[in-house]
Amino acid sequence: AAGVIQSPRHLIKEKRETATLKCYPIPRHDTVYWYQQGPGQDPQFLISFYEKMQSDKGSIPDRFSAQQFSDYHSELNMSSLELGDSALYFCASSLLSRDYKGTYEQYFGPGTRLTVT
Amino acid sequence: DAKTTQPPSMDCAEGRAANLPCNHSTISGNEYVYWYRQIHSQGPQYIIHGLKNNETNEMASLIITEDRKSSTLILPHATLRDTAVYYCIVRGLSGYALNFGKGTSLLVTP
């Protein structure tokens, strides 16, 4: 079965540079979530989109922005990178259609490991 | 979302049942108990969820107490590949984000 795809898998940037992470949800999924997991920490929710509109916002820094496109893929843009932004970034997708009688579980991608030097 | 409390770590022998407890004493009537796990640096994986009845799927069983203030995730025959951090998360049945707490680090030993 198709899974969530994230690219790139690894990214190395210098301080003050910008980075763009991409997420391709499972086909037919309409909701995308972004999570950040620092070294030795638990995943923290950043932001989510449902049908291309921002649906929820967590602890996302103002230097970060994200959007969901018409094909439902999402991009997380990170500017003025800091050393503390080094982390694993996970994207998850879910199907929240009103007609869906499922369990609303989120399916996670393999993550993008961002290293800021 | 209701706050959850889990032991930080547990050990289990391979082939034995692993019973992972979770306290969620402030859970409200419309909130579900979800369990996810994260194998080292991989994306978290959904395991099971329930409202008030016990649930079972191909991965695990979920036992929720009658007052819903606690639950137990049961891996009936733990394998080495079940070594992971297990997260108990309480939330409504909707598209809300997952609030990962501290989780339980389960080590399955040969």
Image: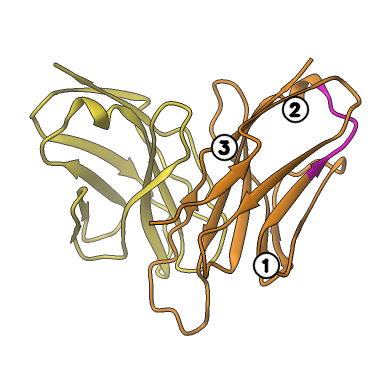
Chain colours: A orange, B yellow
Chain hosting mark 3: A
Chain hosting mark 1: A
Q: Residues within 10 Å of mark 3 (few under 14, many from 20)?
A: many
Task: Please check the rendered image and state whether residue A57 is part of the magenta-colored stretch, yes or no.
Answer: no
Q: Mark 2 falls on what kind of element? A: helix
Dividing the picture into quarters, in which one does residue B106 lie?
top left
Q: Which mark is residue A85?
A: 2
- How many angstroms separate mark 1 from mark 3 (CA)? 20 Å
Type of amino acid at the residue the image marks with label 2: Asp
Q: Mark 1 falls on what kind of element? A: loop
Q: Which residue is mark 3?
A: A111
Q: Point out the stretch of residues depicted in magenta.
A: A77-82
Answer whether labels 3 and 2 touch (C-beta < 8 Å).
no
Image side of residue A8 versus residue A41, left or right: right
Labels 2, 1: one chain? yes
Which tag, 2 or 1, sits closer to the chain's start? 1
Which tag, 3 or 2, sits closer to the chain's start? 2
Q: Which mark is residue A71?
A: 1
- How many angstroms separate mark 3 from mark 2 (CA)? 14 Å
Answer whether labels 2 and 1 touch (C-beta < 8 Å).
no
Type of amino acid at the residue the image marks with label 3: Gly
Type of amino acid at the residue the image marks with label 1: Asp
Dividing the picture into quarters, in which one does residue A6 lie?
top right
Which residue is situated farthest in the left direction here? B15
Residue nearest the viewer, comparing A100 with B12: A100
Select label 3 or label 2 by which is in front: 3
Q: Is residue A77 above or below residue B107?
A: below
Residue A85 percent location from the top left of the image:
75, 27
- How many angstroms separate mark 2 from mark 1 (CA)? 28 Å
Q: Quadrant of the N terminus of chain A?
A: bottom left
Q: Mark 3 falls on what kind of element? A: loop
